[in-house]
Structures are given as structure tokens and as C-alpha cells.
Amino acid sequence: MASINYPYPDPKNDAERAANRQAADDYQRQEEEDADFLDWEEELGWR
């Protein structure tokens, strides 16, 4: 059975851990921004 590297592969060193942390932070920020836009669209009656 193949292993699934989700959401990020196991870090093998500090550089990979830092890169995974940065990617997770970027993803979280994008999710929050998307939610804000959806809220604004509803408030403005665009949805």
C-alpha cells in the first residue's frame, strides 16, 4: 500500500520543517481570505 504524504511529507531536517510550516501558514491565510471574500459577497448581495 502506498503511503500518502498529506498534507506535507515527513520533514527530514530543519529546512524542510520550516518550509512545511511556511506552506501551512500560507494555506491558512488563503483559506481565511477566501472566507472573508465569500462573506463580503453575501453582504453585498452578489451571492
Image: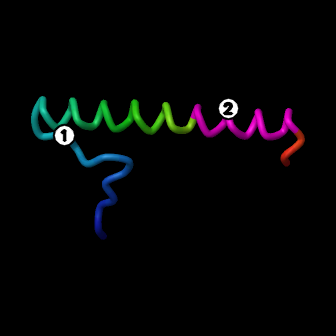
Image quarter of the N terminus: bottom left
Q: Amino acid at mark 1?
A: Pro
Name the residue at 21% across, 30% down: 18
Element type where label 2 sits in the image:
helix
Q: Residues within 10 Å of mark 1 (few under 14, many from 20)?
A: few
Name the residue at 31% across, 46% down: 8
Residue 23 placed where, x, y %?
Answer: 34, 38
Taking the image as shown, residue 15 lies to the left or right of residue 38, namely left
Residue 25 placed where, x, y %?
Answer: 40, 30
Taking the image as shown, residue 32 lies to the left or right of residue 7, namely right
The one nearer the camera, 17 or 25, is 25
Instruction: Judge depth for marks 2 and 1 and give the one in front.
Output: 2
* Magenta stretch, residue numbers: 32-44
Residue 5 placed where, x, y %?
Answer: 31, 54
Question: Was residue 29 drawn as part of the magenta stretch in this picture?
Answer: no
Residue 14 placed where, x, y %?
Answer: 12, 29
Q: Which residue is mark 1?
A: 11
Dominant SS of magenta comes to: helix
Question: Was residue 40 drawn as part of the magenta stretch in this picture?
Answer: yes
Q: How is the image coloured?
A: rainbow
Q: Which mark is residue 36?
A: 2
Taking the image as shown, residue 13 lies to the left or right of residue 11, namely left
Taking the image as shown, residue 32 lies to the left or right of residue 16, namely right
